[in-house]
Amino acid sequence: SNSPFSPTFPAWDKEVLHHTFDYIDYISMHAYYTYPTSDHSLQEFLASGRSFEDYIARGKKLIIDEKRKRRSDKAVYLSVDEWNVWHTFDGTSNRQADWACGLPLLENNYDMADALVFAEMLLTLVNNADYVKIGCLAQLVNVIAPILTQNDGGVLKQTTFYPFAYVAKYFAGTAALRTESKLPMYKSGKYGKAKGVYHTVAYDEAAKTYHVAIVNVTDKNLAIGIMFDQSTNLSAASVLSAQDVHAKNTFDNPDNVVLTDVDPRSVWDGKRLVAGSYSVTFAKFTVK
């Protein structure tokens, strides 16, 4: 069905899986999110991550149920081969001209709010790495992308570039850990009970380091207690945030919203990590 909003999901996917289970390796899943309400409610948009989590969970359940019916040990996984934030209401998806060289097309200009939802989705993929073996951001350059270019030069890193680049660099080849938490929730009209905080932890056994990612979509600074099963030191921390949640980067102001390295002591007191309101925080903990 290739969408969490398709009227045929998950019934059609279940039918396809039943008939093709012995011949396939993956079920394809696509997910794009925008403001789900006509008033462009920020809180409703920030609940998109919960919808994406539910979508992945239902895809996993389809596979697990079919395996149990067959008493099979065959591995079938999820390929989330299209995912992103995609807006059409603001005009940035409109074709600017025809028969032009390198004409702008679907060039969404992403702000901090978009980066938050983008990071929610990214962390969800990591947290479901047991079944999500392929996760392809659509797209990489210009078309609903973290990187924009100009004809004859000029490259712009959008707000969504920074969480994507960090996770691609530091979460590769590591173990995604299952975490348990009690963190704020809020009521979303569109997606039900939504998270105020999204998080993931990856462990690099060779380097003896934990990489923690926290997305705080509340309007409050939160001191979040973190406990590992071994003694650690916080060795590095970086934060993506903006005073205006709708701030974005432009070619005239390319560094308006960037991932910034901070003094670890400013966000960590030995037990709690401070995640600012509407922010994405990355922290590296080294085993003593």
Image: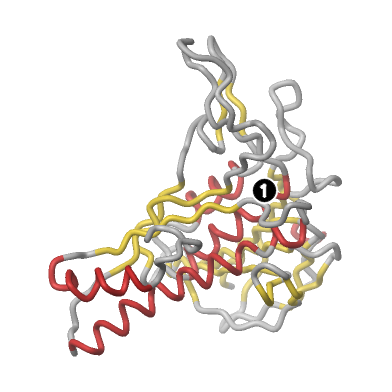
Q: Quadrant of residue 47?
A: bottom right
Question: Where does the image place residue 201, in percent across and percent down from the top left?
Answer: 55, 69
Determine whether 208 is above or below 257 in the image: below
Residue 230 appears left or right of 31: right
Query: Residue 137: image x %, image y %?
Result: 46, 47
- The three-letter amino acid code for the residue at tag 1 is Asp
Q: Percent x, y for residue 166?
A: 56, 49
Q: Residue at x 72, y 70 (%)?
A: 189
Task: Give percent across and percent down for residue 75.
Answer: 23, 74
Q: Residues within 10 Å of mark 1 (few under 14, many from 20)?
A: many
| Residue 195 position (above or below residue 160) | below
Looking at the rendered structure, the secondary structure element under dot 1 is: helix
- Of 175 and 265, nearer the camera is 175
Query: Quadrant of the rendered structure where residue 255 is?
Result: top right
The residue depicted at 69 percent of the width and 77 percent of the height is 193
Q: Is residue 243 above or below residue 127?
A: above
> In the figure, residue 111 lies in which quadrant?
top right
Residue at image mark 1: 114
- The residue closer to the viewer here, 144 or 94, is 94
Identify the residue shown where x is 58% and y is 23%.
155
Q: Residue furthest left?
A: 23
- Residue 34 in sight from this viewpoint: yes
Observer able to see residue 271? no
**Residue sitting nearer the eye, 3 or 216:** 3
Rendered-image quadrant of the C terminus? bottom right
Q: How many marks?
A: 1
Q: Quadrant of the N terminus?
A: bottom left
